[in-house]
């Protein structure tokens, strides 16, 4: 995003079709804190406002699915203190934001190896998901203990388990069949991937699903990301020509 360029308004963005599914790699929390001489966890706490703004703006835009890369499988390798702190922040956000999510008609879903989360975190997560189960608006997907390669491996394991119960003909395993074995079964693939902090990699995120997603990268660190940045990303997306491998 060009900082000198005025961000489009909500009204301007709504003049064209918006993406059905936006996925976001929320990067830069640690750097945000380090630049201010603060502990890394303070950066993660500061990112909470960005999450709220993006969720609210997605509701305003009529986005159907918003997937946030919240905690990767690789993140378990961080120090025990940071991991514990991240779990506490997750629990706090789930408890304190559920009323706002309810008012905004947001549903909650998770992808990833959630069984690896601490028991208390899993219980709060399930409680929040149940609390929001009556909603039928934006589907907020939290990628927790998630890795794209692991998701594909888990999908293969599910196929093998089904094959033991009933023989699956090799010809029956097409792309639609395989997609149905992924954690994102029933969700549309992302139309737009947003990555903050300027990094140019997908970081093991939605490796199958991002096949034809449009990428939008900004140098803005996640705690500083606001609705104006989301509007700009969607506005730029609307001006791209998506060919899906075809000439036109």
Image (spheres, rainbow, N blue to C red):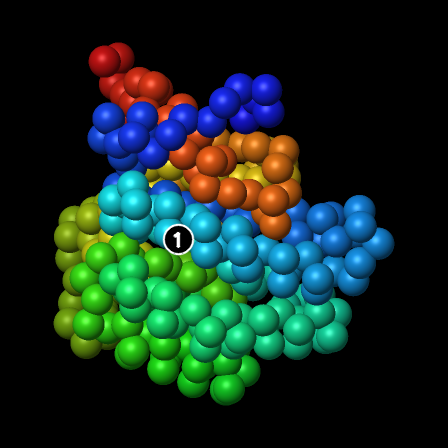
Question: Could you tell me which quadrant the C terminus lies in?
Answer: top left
Among the 4 quarters of the image, the one containing residue 234 = top left
Residue at 37% across, 66% down: 100
| Residue 40 position (above or below residue 25) | below
Question: Could you tell me which quadrant the N terminus lies in?
Answer: top right
Element type at marker 1?
helix
| Residue 128 position (above or below residue 33) | below
Residue position marked by numbered label 1 in the rendering: 55
Instruction: From the top left corner, tell me how far across and down residue 99 is, in percent.
Output: 36, 72
Q: Residue furthest right?
A: 37
Task: Please rate how many residues cluster around mark 1, counting C-alpha atoms within 10 Å: few if below 14, some from 14 to 19, many from 20.
Answer: many
Among the 4 quarters of the image, the one containing residue 213 = top left
Instruction: From the top left corner, tell me how far across and down residue 230 is, in percent.
Output: 44, 38
Residue at 61% across, 44% down: 224
Instruction: From the top left corner, tell me how far across and down residue 194 is, in percent.
Output: 47, 39
Q: Quick check: 72 left or right of 67?
A: right
Inspect this view and state whether residue 130 appears. yes
Instruction: From the top left corner, tell me how far across and down residue 206 is, in percent.
Output: 42, 49
Residue at 59% across, 55% down: 47
Total tally of numbered discs in the picture: 1
| Residue 87 position (above or below residue 231) | below
Give the camera-side residue of 92 and 145: 92
Q: Quick check: 62 left or right of 99?
A: left
Inspect this view and state whether residue 170 appears. no
């Amino acid at each position: 995003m060009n900082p000198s360029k005025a961000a489009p308004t909500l009204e301007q963005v709504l003049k064209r079709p918006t993406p059905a599914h936006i996925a976001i790699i929320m990067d830069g929390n640690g750097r945000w804190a380090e630049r201010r001489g603060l502990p890394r966890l303070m950066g993660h706490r500061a990112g909470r406002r960005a999450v709220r703004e993006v969720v609210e703006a997605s509701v305003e835009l009529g986005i159907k699915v918003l997937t946030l890369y919240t905690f990767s499988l690789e993140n378990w390798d961080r120090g025990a203190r940071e991991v514990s702190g991240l779990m506490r922040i997750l629990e706090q956000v789930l408890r304190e934001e559920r009323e706002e999510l309810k008012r905004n008609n947001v549903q909650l879903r998770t992808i990833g190896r959630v069984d690896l989360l601490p028991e208390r975190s899993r219980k709060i997560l399930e409680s929040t998901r149940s609390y929001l189960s009556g909603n039928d608006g934006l589907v907020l997907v939290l990628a927790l203990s998630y890795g794209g390669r692991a998701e594909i491996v888990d999908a293969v394991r599910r196929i093998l388990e089904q094959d033991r119960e009933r023989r699956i003909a090799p010809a029956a395993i097409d792309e639609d069949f395989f997609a149905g074995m992924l954690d994102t079964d029933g969700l549309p693939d992302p139309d737009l991937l947003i990555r903050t902090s300027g990094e140019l990699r997908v970081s093991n995120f939605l490796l199958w699903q991002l096949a034809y997603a449009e990428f939008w990268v900004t140098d803005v660190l996640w705690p500083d990301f606001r609705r104006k940045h989301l509007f700009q990303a969607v506005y730029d997306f609307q001006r791209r020509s998506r060919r899906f491998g075809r000439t036109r």
